[in-house]
């Protein structure tokens, strides 16, 4: 299994222009956005890692994944 390094600069063997820039949301305050509430949960480290990896692959945030999964779970109830 090949190890992926998300921290260091892209390797020179990749064709030019193949790097993707991640979109980061910037907020002026430290609190949640209007109409949102902050949620804190302790989850297993391996689950957190899998969520982060999936978010990177899908170019979204862990928050986006959690919101989508929560809505799907609630809709199935």
Image (cartoon, rainbow, N blue to C red):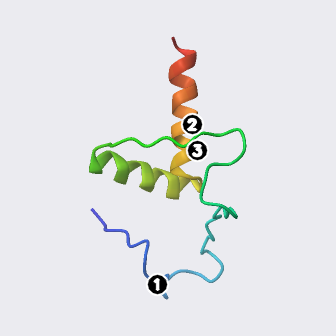
- Residue at 58% x, 81% y is 15
Where residue 9 sits: x, y (%)? 48, 84
Q: Which residue was labeled with disc 1?
A: 11
In this view, the residue in front, 26 or 18, is 26
For the residues marked 2 and 3, what is the alpha-carbon distance in whole angstroms? Answer: 5 Å
Would you name the residue on which mark 2 appears?
A: 67
Q: In this view, does 4 lie above or below 77?
A: below
- Crowding at dot 3, Cα within 10 Å, few <14 / some 14-19 / many 20+, comes out as few
Position of 17 relative to 26 (above/below): below
| Apparent side of residue 47 relative to residue 71 in the rendered image (left or right) | left
Q: Quadrant of the N terminus?
A: bottom left
> Gap in Å between the C-alphas at discs 1 and 3?
29 Å
Furthest residue in direction bottom, as rendered = 12
Residue at the disc numbered 3: 64
The Cα–Cα distance between marks 1 and 2, rounded to whole angstroms, is 34 Å
The residue lying at 61 percent from left, 66 percent from top is: 22
The answer to whether the residues at label 2 and label 3 have Cβ atoms under 8 Å apart is yes
Q: Residue at 57% across / 34% down in the picture?
A: 68
The local secondary structure at tag 2 comes to: helix
Task: Give the image location of residue 34, x and y in percent.
Answer: 72, 44
Question: Is label 1 in contact with label 3 (beta carbons under 8 Å)?
Answer: no
Asked whether 52 or 38 is in front, the reply is: 38
Q: Mark 2: few, some, or many residues within 10 Å (few <14, many ≥20)?
A: few
Which residue is most to the top? 77
In terms of secondary structure, where does tag 1 sit? loop
Dot 1 alpha-carbon crowd within 10 angstroms: few under 14, some 14 to 19, many 20 or more: few
Q: Which of marks 1 and 3 is in front?
A: 3
**SS state under label 3:** helix
Q: Which of marks 1 and 3 is nearer the N terminus?
A: 1
């Amino acid at each position: 299994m090949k190890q992926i390094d998300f921290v260091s600069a892209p390797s020179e063997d990749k064709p030019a222009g193949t790097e993707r820039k991640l979109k980061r949301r910037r907020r002026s305050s430290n609190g949640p956005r209007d109409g949102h509430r902050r949620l804190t949960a302790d989850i297993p480290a391996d689950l957190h890692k899998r969520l982060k990896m999936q978010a990177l692959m899908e170019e979204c945030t862990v928050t986006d994944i959690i919101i989508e999964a929560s809505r799907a779970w609630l809709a199935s109830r």
